[in-house]
Image: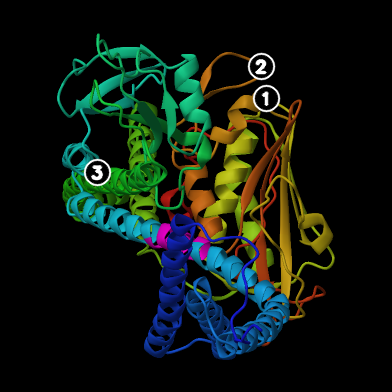
Amino acid sequence: MMESCDCIDTQWPPDELLVKYQYISDALIALAYFSIPLELIYFVQKSAFFPYRWVLMQFGAFIVLCGATHFINLWTFSTHSKTVAMAMTVAKVACAIVSCSTALMLVHIIPDLLSVKTRELILKNKAEELDREMGLILTQEETGRHVRMLTHEIRSTLDRDTILKTTLVELGKTLGLEECALWMPSRAGISLQLSHALNYQIPVGAHIPINLPVVNDVFKSNRAIRVPYNCQLAKVRTPYLAPEVVAVRVPVLNLSNFQMNNWPDGSSRSYAIMVLILPTGSARKWRDHELELVNVVADQVAVALSHAAILEESMHARDQLVDQNIALDLARREAEMAVHARNDFLAVMNHEMRTPMHATIALSSLLLETELSPEQRVMIETILKSSNLLATLINDVLDLSRLEDGSLALNIRSFNLHAIFKEAMDLIKPIASVKKLSMALMLASDLPVCAVGDEKRLMQIILNIVGNGVKFTKEGHVSIIASVAKLESLRDWRAPEFYPMQSDRHFYLQVQVKDSGCGVLPQDIPHLFTRFTQLRTRSSRTNGGVGLGLALCKRFANLMGGHIWIESDGPEKEVQISMDTDQSSEKPIKSPFPVLDIKEVSELRCTFRAPAAAPLLPEQHGSFI
C-alpha cells in the first residue's frame, strides 16, 4: 500500500541541463520584472507632471505579478508541495486580471500617447521655425545696423566724390567684396564712364555704351540683379571659380539750370550703375539680406547725390546772383551818375540857355517893329524863327525829362474848352494860309464850354497833332472835329490797355484832326510815338523825323490817365487819345452847350497824313515835333 503525498508527478523525466537553464531564466526574469516597477516609481516621482499615474500603477502591478509567477516557478522544477501550486495559481490568475485590465486601458491611452508625439513634432517644427525667424530678425538687425552706419557715413557730407568713395569703401568692408565700382552717365547720355572703384581692378575712366543689353536690364529693374561675371560692367577674368556679381541702378538727377519753382520731373532723371563683386575663387553666394542691403544703400546714395547736386546748383546760383548783384549795383551807380549828369545839363540848359534865348527872341521881336530894309527884315525873321525853334526844343526836352523822372505835375484849373480849339485854329490858320490849305473847326452840339484840367498841356497836344497835319499836307484841307464820345466807341482793340468806365460824373472827349496829306507806311505806325524816329511816307522815300512832339503827346496823355494810338488806312491816318472828364463844381459860363469838366486826358482822336518833324508855332503853346 502506497503512501499519499502533495507532490505532482512529472510525465517525463527532467533533463538536468534544461531545468538548469529554465531555472536561471526565471530567476533573471523575476529580477527584471521586480526592478522595472521600481524604476517606474522612481522616474514618476522625479517627474513634476505626468498625466498617466494610474496606468503606470496597473502596468507596475502587471509586471510584479508576472515576476511573481516566474519567481514561484522556481520551486516547480523540483518536488514541491500543494502550497506552491496554489501560490502559482493565485499569481497567474491575478496576473491575468491585471494584464487584461491594463490592455483595456491602453486602448484609450495609446491614441493620447500618439497625439503627444504628433504635438511633439509640431512643437519641434515650430521651434525650428522660431529659430529661423530669430535668425532672420538677427540678420535684419545686423543689416539695419550696417545700413544706419552706411547712411550716417554717406550723409555726413554733401560732397559728391566723398559720398561715392565712402559708399564703396563701407560696402566693401561690410559685405567683404573684392571689387565695388560705380559707372556714371556721361554728359551726352550715350555712354557710362567708370568714375569710382574700390580696388581699381577696372581702370577708372573706361567707357561702355549705354545701349548694352545688360545695362538695359539693370536700368529696367528697381532692385539689385545678378549679372554675368564676364560682362562689360564687371570684366572679371579669372581661371578659378567665377564670383557672383550683382548690379543695381542709382538714380541721378539732372539739375542743370535748376530753379526752385521748376523741380525736375522723371524725364530729366538718368541712372548710374553700382557693381558689386564677391571674392574670386569663393563658393560664396549672394544672400537675400545682402541684396536688400545693397538696394537700401543704393537708395540712400541716390538721395545723398540729389542733395549734393541741389547744393552745388544752389551754390552756383548764389555765385551767379552775387555777380548779378554786383553788376546791377554798378549799373545803378552808372545810372545815378547819368541821371545826375543829365540833371546838371538840364539845369544848365534851363538857366544858362533859356535866359539868352529869351533875350534874343525879345530883341528880334522889337527889331521887327522898327523900320528895316527887306534884307534886314528877312534876317531878323530868320533869327526869330530859329530862336523860337530852339526855345521850343529846350522846352520839350525839359518837359520830357520831367515826365521821365515823374516830377512834372499837371496844373488843374477851370478853362474854356471852346476857346482852346478856337485859339488853336487862330494859331494854325496863318501857316495853313501860306500853304493854301483850307481849315475847318466843327464843335459838336453836346460839347461843354467849360472844363477843369491842364489847359496848357491840352493845347500842346492839340497843336502838335494839328501842326503835324498842316506841315505834311501839300494841298487840300485840314479839319478839327470835337465831340463827347460814347463809351461804346472807346472800346477798341487798338488800345487794349485802355479801359473806359461809365460814370455819372465823367465824360469822354473825342477830337478828330483830318487832313488830305501824304500817308505813313503801316510798318512805321508803331514807331510814331518814339522820339527822333526817322520814317518814310507813302508818297516818297524821303525820311521824316518824328522828333519829340508825338512822344510828348503820348506821355501827356498817359499822365492825364488816357491813351493815344494811331490808325492808318491808305492815305488816311488817325491818332486817338482819350480824355476822362467829370462834372465841374464851378458855375459854367453861359453857353448854348453843356459844361464838361475835364479832369484827366483820356481820349484825343486825330487823323493826320504824316508825322511832324519840326515845330510850327511859337514857344508859348508848346511844340509840334
Question: What residue do we see at 72% from left, 62% from top?
Answer: 509
Residue at 79%, 76% in the rendered image? 594
First to last magenta residue range: 125-134
Nearer the camera: disc 2 or disc 3: 3
Mark 2 and mark 1 in contact? Answer it, CB < 8 Å.
Answer: yes
Q: Taken as a whole, is the magenta stretch helix, strand or loop?
A: helix
Query: Which of the 4 quarters of the picture holds residue 236?
Result: top left
Give 531 or 192, whichever is nearer the viewer: 192
Which badge, 1 or 3, is on the more N-terminal residue?
A: 3
What residue is pinned by disc 3? 312
Q: Is residue 346 visible?
A: no
Residue 490 is a magenta residue: no
For residue 108, above or below residue 598 = below
Q: Mark 1 points at which residue?
A: 518
Question: Which badge, 2 or 3, is on the more N-terminal residue?
Answer: 3
Depth check: 484 or 427 in front? 484
Q: Residues within 10 Å of mark 2 (few under 14, many from 20)?
A: few
